[in-house]
Image: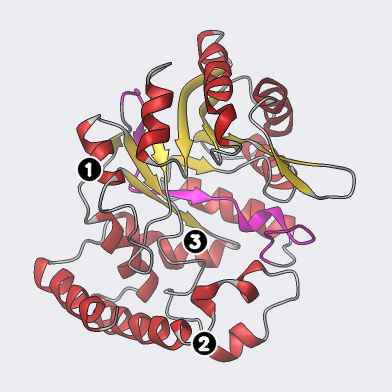
Amino acid sequence: METKKLGNSDLHLTPIGFGAWAIGGGDWAFAWGPQDDADSIEAIHRAIDLGINWIDTAAVYGLGHSEEVVGKALKTASARPYVFTKCSMLWDEKREIHRSLKTVRQEAEASLRRLQVDVIDLYQIHWPVPDEEIEEGWSTMADLQREGKIRWIGVSNFDVAQMERAQAIAPITSLQPPYSMVNRSVEAEILPFCEKHRIGVINYSPMVSGLLTGSMTKERVVAFPKDDFRRNAKQFQEPQLSRNLALAGLLASIGVRHGVSAGVVAIAWTLHHKAITAAIVGGRSAKQVDGIFPAANFRLTEPEFAEIGAFLQANP
């Protein structure tokens, strides 16, 4: 499998990485519903066995639980992947989430314990909130890197002005933005900025939280568990839902030509952009990992990319 260097780091990433958001389980503000830990560990092991060499999680996923599951999986994995996680979203005893960039050091120490690792390969500020604390938070990130607790430091969901402020303190290795054919907001300014400054980009939600997998239906959306955040996401509500399911249908038709799923085509569309280093792909079971793994090698032809572009232009 080909790899690509992430920004200014010595990390060479496979085209897709294992995203550990959903394996955090239910009962928190941004949950995907209940999740079996044994299935999660099996999914991680399958991804690693197939050659995927990085995992992306965050402290807030499952309020610490995702990191704990990743830590358990690493103990019995066939290889040691790069481990990426994030800070800035904290929770209290009532499981209510708040945001701060004043506690980066304490968060990093807690993530190291939950992951059961000595060093985090890439540590990222999850959200630039509060905005006025960016300099303090990024300075602490740089301190942790110098101390050897973190190998490389990155940001997530930052705009250009916020990245410029961080860069004035210490180099940014990577940006993690949402990017898909349903959400293209980073194309105008953010991705060109990253290219110019050699900042790696690992995009999240290339399949829009399952919407472009080809297996999503209106009936499934209606039946989402009450603690599934997608129940309230605008992409899963009309009139956008019908348009997005039609887009998924087009991706499925392209996939049939190559024996791959609509989700694989959706991921390939994001990897077509030269600024993208690699894409984060979630998996809740080994079967899901098997289904999406062809995205590591499948690439769209220019006519197929244009075919999708024509749909997007006709159905904004």
Is residue 310 visible to the viewer in this orientation of the structure? Answer: yes
**N-terminal of the two: label 3 or label 1?**
1
* Distance from the alpha carbon under mark 3 to that under mark 1: 31 Å
Highlighted range, magenta: 8-32
Q: CB atoms at circles 2 and 1 under 8 Å apart?
A: no
Q: Which residue is mark 2?
A: 217
Q: Which mark is residue 192?
A: 1
Classify mark 3: residues with Cα within 10 Å, few (<14), some (14-19) or many (20+).
Answer: many
Residue at image point 73% right, 33% down = 114
Disc 3 designates what residue? 289
Q: Is residue 249 left or right of residue 122?
A: left
Kindly report the distance in space between the C-alpha atoms of the residues bearing marks 2 and 1: 35 Å
Main secondary structure type of the part rendered in magenta = loop
**Residue 83 shown left or right of residue 228 in the figure:** left
Outermost residue on the left side: it is 303
Considering every residue shown, the one lying at the far bottom of the view is 219
